[in-house]
Image (cartoon, rainbow, N blue to C red):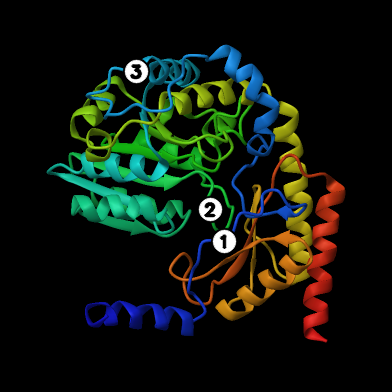
Amino acid sequence: MVPYRDYQKILESFDNENRFRTIPADRSESLRIDLTSNDYLGLGAKWKDYADEFGRRYPDASFSSSASRLLSQRQNHHEHLENLLSGLYGKDVLLFNSGYHANVGIIQALNIPDTVILCDKLIHASMIDGLMLAKADFQRWRHNDITSLGKLLEKHKNSTRCIVVLESIYSMDGDLAPLRDIVDLKKTYPNMILYVDEAHAFGTRGDRGLGLAEELGVIDDIDILVGTLGKAAASSGAFVATHPLLKSYFVNCSRSFIFSTALPPVNAAWSEFMIINILSMVKERKHLLEISDLFRKGIEDISGSSNLSRSHIVPLVVGDAGKALQLAARLSVKGIDVLPIRRPTVPLGGERIRFSLSADMSAQTIEHILKTIREVIKNHED
């Protein structure tokens, strides 16, 4: 154990700081309210309802691709999915194995000489890892602050390219990026390339569920649009919708694409099947927004402070890792599963409970959750 001793000390420090993590047991068969999942449209919980139809429509979908996309002969289902998404976005589309693979590989590939990357301060860890892998020259702008971004663009207006990187819906606060205002900056700075990760917006926003960019009518203004298939689409994988030249460039230069075994064809087929269903889920998206607004107002009443969320992700900031763990445990006893979020996911003092809502929840369920949270907090204070 001597060679492991320093690793053990690190784990012990995590435990002392109430941020030691373990993989939870499977509780999917129990009658509980799950607020931990990214299954925003409830499709993942209903997969059995779709299984027979999927089997009839895609009888030849293999469970193994057995090689990377650049080597594998089993490409039809990947291409069908890419073509579907390409038709929806009006851009070329390339599949990746996950949102993490997409962000790491794309950002790594984009960093060539005379490139400056300007990123929102709260971008996802996958984007940060891409920057680290690329050894990129990057600077951060204050979260959702157009003035801060504008100053950086002005500073680098003579660079060949400034790649502006952000998310449309942020995963910890549930707030929205000012996409229209950011798009407007492209008129002033022609060297700007706009990179938007729609991970938490794909499926949940826009008339057809294509994301916040569709809702705001700015898809055509985004150069690199990343979406994930493992959240609202209840599948796995991710995609980038972009210019044909950039798609070809990523095929040739994105290491996470080149050196990863491709998604199983059955996953690509399932994603296609799910997306076809998502396109018509207008009522579900409307309902999700309504219950999210109801829940946010309830959390504001409980916390006594305003909440940044304008989406189906709603945080309750408690400011202490131990308190977050305790609140999650007490809610679990009441049959409500929630996630305590701690460092390094959020900064010290930003510890919270993150509630992920789903369109299959009723307004009555939301009221029950809020009532239970109030009772648990009140009983603990008493």
Q: Amino acid at mark 1?
A: Pro
Rendered-image quadrant of the N terminus = bottom left
Q: Earlier in the sequence, mark 1 or mark 3?
A: 1
Coordinates of residue 55 in the picture (x, y in percent): 58, 18
| 364 displayed left or right of 331 | right
The answer to which image quadrant residue 40 occupies is: top right
Q: Amino acid at mark 2?
A: Ser
Could you tell me which secondary element the residue under label 2 belongs to?
Answer: loop
Could you tell me which secondary element the residue under label 1 belongs to?
Answer: loop
Mark 3 crowd level (few <14, some 14–19, many ≥20, 10 Å Cα)? some
Mark 2 crowd level (few <14, some 14–19, many ≥20, 10 Å Cα)? many
Q: What's the mark number on residue 343? A: none
Of the pair 216 and 45, the residue shown nearer to us? 45
Q: Which residue matches tag 1? A: 24
For residue 227, above or below residue 247: below
Coordinates of residue 283 in the picture (x, y in percent): 75, 29
Q: Which residue matches tag 3? A: 75
Q: Earlier in the sequence, mark 3 or mark 2?
A: 3
Rendered-image quadrant of the C terminus = bottom right
